[in-house]
Image (spheres, rainbow, N blue to C red):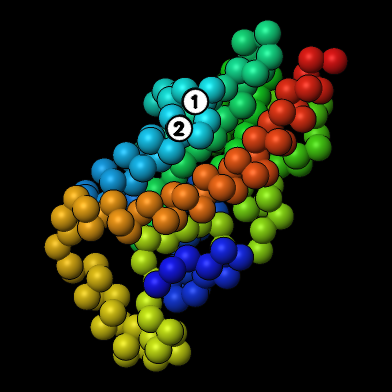
Amino acid sequence: MAYSPNYSFKGNHNRTDYGPLNSGVRPNMRKELLNAWRDAVTESMAFSLPQFVLHNARRPGAERGMLCYSWAPTPSKKFTCFLVFRPIASEGFDTWAGWSIDGKLPYGLESVSSDPEDFAASHFVLSTLELAGRSGLVGWSFWEPSDAAIDDPGRFAQEYAEHFSKALSDSDAANLVRPAVAFAMAEIEGYCLPYFNKRAAAERL
């Protein structure tokens, strides 16, 4: 099933509890999908946003499996923009955008602003959904049930079991993750990058 361009996701998107930021939810993703997802994100970031570099997130607040990228857009290396890709249960991911004036990853910090216009803050982080003003759920899933299964719990359970028990080749996994990663990247390029440029311009004043 194709991903809807207006992000009106169905099926397991409405049935999965992705949990709030810092909820402690851990990835429940098959190894093949996790590897394919990491490869797709890495390739997409290198192609579309090469100014961002992989950021070492091994510190309190960072969650297992997260991919964090950073970019210092001003002469002051301390002001830094961040993008966070977080694998979530069940076989999906969400994305977060943030910045800090001291180079610290804002994701997971105790005192952090969620107001994108609060330029006086030291740290800011927000889901890309909220930054883009998009409706829907915060995460992207690698699987959706058929239309017929939406209101049929028995059929939904059958399709769910078939999908999550199916053996995946590397190409199967890549085909599952790439559409979702492409939509996430479009959201980041369309909304987060202009916001980062606006914020960096204010920092230069």
Q: Nearer the viewer, residue 108 or 7?
A: 7
**Residue most toward the front?**
47
Amino acid residing under circle 1: Pro
Residue 101 in view of the camera: yes
Q: Residue at x 39, y 48 (%)?
A: 87
Q: Residue at x 28, y 46 (%)?
A: 36
Quick check: 59 above or below 179?
above
Q: Is the Cβ of the residue at disc 2 closer than 8 Å to that at disc 1?
A: yes
Return the residue at label 2: 47
Quick check: 105 above or below 6?
above
Q: Position of residue 114 (x, y in %)?
A: 71, 42
Q: What SS does tag 2 mark?
A: helix
Quick check: 140 above or below 202?
below
Q: Position of residue 196 (x, y in %)?
A: 69, 31
Q: Which image quarter is the N terminus in?
A: bottom left
Quick check: 180 above or below 42?
below
Total numbered circles? 2
Q: Nearer the viewer, residue 200 or 115?
A: 200
Q: Residue at x 57, y 30 (%)?
A: 82
Disc on res. 50: 1
Q: Nearer the viewer, residue 177 or 94?
A: 177
Mark 1 crowdedness (10 Å alpha carbons): few <14, some 14-19, many ≥20: few
Q: Position of residue 40 (x, y in %)?
A: 36, 42
Residue 24 in view of the camera: no
Q: Using the rendered view, name the quadrant where residue 73 is placed.
A: top right
Disc on res. 189: none
Q: Residue at x 73, y 23 (%)?
A: 200
Q: In the visual, does 91 lie left or right of 137?
A: left
Amino acid residing under circle 2: Phe
Q: Nearer the viewer, residue 142 or 15?
A: 142
Mark 2 crowdedness (10 Å alpha carbons): few <14, some 14-19, many ≥20: few
